[in-house]
Amino acid sequence: MKTDYGRLGSESLKRLEASARNVEAVQTKFLLNWLNENRDTEFGRRYGFAQMDSVREYQKKVPLSTYEDYARAVDRMIDGEKNILTARDAVYFCISSGTVGDEKYIPLTEYDLEAHYTFMYGAVFGQVREHYRDLDEADVFGKIFQIGEFAKTYMPDGKMNGIRSSCVYQWLDRNGEFDASDYCVPKEILFPETLEDQLYVKVRFALEERGLTAIHGVFINRIAGVIEYILRNWEALLNDMEYGTVSADIPEKQKKYLADKLPPNPERARELRGISCEERHKGIIRKIWKNIKYILAIGGDSFFYYTEKVRGYADGVPVHYFVFAASEGVFGLAENMDSADRYMLLPESVFFEFIPVNGDHDHTPLLIGEVKAGEKYELVVTNRSGLYRYRLGDVVKVVGMHEMAPVVKFCYRRSQVINIAGEKSNQQQFDMAIKRFMELARTEVRGYCVCEDFSEIAPGYLFYMECEEAPRDADAIFEECMCAANPEYRSCRNMREIRPLQIRFLREGSFRRYEQRLAERGKPMAQSKMPHFLNTEEKKRFFAAQTKLL
């Protein structure tokens, strides 16, 4: 069974474009149909879904919510109770980390997974095909190097669980609709028995595959990390390829597996050795895989260091910046290939409401046809799995329109701000300050994280940075950048309500070691992204221990 990516992509994209041309009607129909279907659920009876015949009535009668409002209901669903939030049963429980690290379980219905499949999976292939409309389909869709691995894990009653990015693959495989032959690694590597670091194994298979046309990941820092792993271990990997050996410190079962699956391949090793040391950085992706057509990963300003790294490694290979999504749903799709930080909202995926960030929060949230370009909003969603008027916590800025569908840029998480004296510094402002700091200090910041520092009488900001080199007067330079990025911070500094910020520089590889630590604890590497806010004591201790002496 070979997936017809061209047909799937075309059908999915046509459906999306049709809904984008008529977003208000599509949103209204989606919501009212969903309320009618769930009128006899426990939640539907509580709020009178059966009597609701308009969007405004829904907004008036159903309160805004957060995960805590559903936690008990989800526990009951896990215990096997039905008809609580939705008439449809949950078939997958998405595991998500809370703000302070507590696990949350988000139930997903097949109705939700169908939207995921259409708009987060199928429509991507449609956009890729549109980008390469002049090429034969066989030249566009070949083997995929999927960076993530998706262990099949289950709830006590046998329902599937795991991270959002793997749910559609597990669901397709359960239904006999997943074709592992589309990927450069065997199915048992994509779906390992347990979540474990299989980077060496996957890289070995990927390097062998001449016909690779795509690299898929979730976050772009993971793509950069895999390429850097290949570059750091270049000679060892090619020696192993040539002689059929395994030099990496991996479990014996993996060594035996590779010996059985990958015999010596001196011809391919010789081909790759033709890439000289001087040529191994800029454009290395296309030099290894000459038929590569695109890279799929979430990137942009929130991952600016790694986005630029991957662009350098790709040297012209387009990047599809994938989706704007969370455990609670799929919200937006990258507007086009190579369009970073521009996600068109998906009218059929969830029902959207928008709370203006700079407006009166006591007013009813706006609907999709009422938002304005240039304004920022906190998203509220009603999804296909039983979350109603759910405050997602994500703040987005409307940056344009695709047909009638808003195109947004993710700005920051409402809960992830540093607020010592009313200044409310958010990730978007930190990212702006870091980019300016790199320009003024003439250095590269590989990663940063921040926390409040109450160790002295006046509070302040404590930054940890992993830099190419530690610049002189770094604190003063970055202070200037922070004041420019957040005028409220500058005002608090002028009033001496906040003392000057401090930077502690980290040893090389600190963020990579943090990622490895998470992997050792069973956190899926596919879902790994850079920590920016040190919101637990454990995170603070880890990065404090990585500080280097200057």
Image (tube, grey):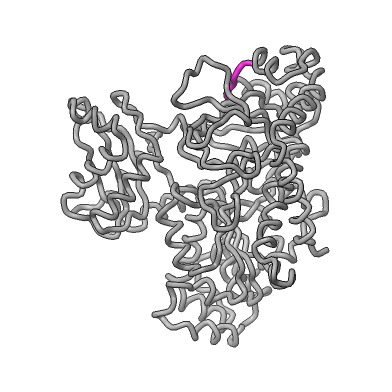
Q: Residue at x 49, y 34 (%)?
A: 101
Q: Quadrant of residue 138?
A: bottom right
Q: Quadrant of residue 1?
A: bottom right
Position of 17 compared to 289: left or right? right
Position of 16 compared to 219: left or right? right
Quadrant including the C terminus? bottom left
Q: Residue at x 61, y 68 (%)?
A: 293
Specify whether residue 65 is painted magenta: yes
534 versus 306 height, above or below: above
Q: Residue at x 68, y 17 (%)?
A: 56
455 versus 514 height, above or below: above
- SS majority, magenta: loop
Specify whether residue 189 is painted magenta: no
Query: Which span of residues is magenta-colored?
Result: 63-67
Residue 304 percent coordinates (x, y): 42, 53
The answer to whether one can see residue 67 in this image is no
Q: Quadrant of residue 317?
A: bottom right
The answer to whether one can see residue 335 in this image is yes
Residue 169 percent coordinates (x, y): 71, 51
Tag count: 0
Q: Residue at x 40, y 40 (%)?
A: 428
156 versus 292 height, above or below: above
Residue 82 percent coordinates (x, y): 79, 24
Residue 324 percent coordinates (x, y): 58, 43
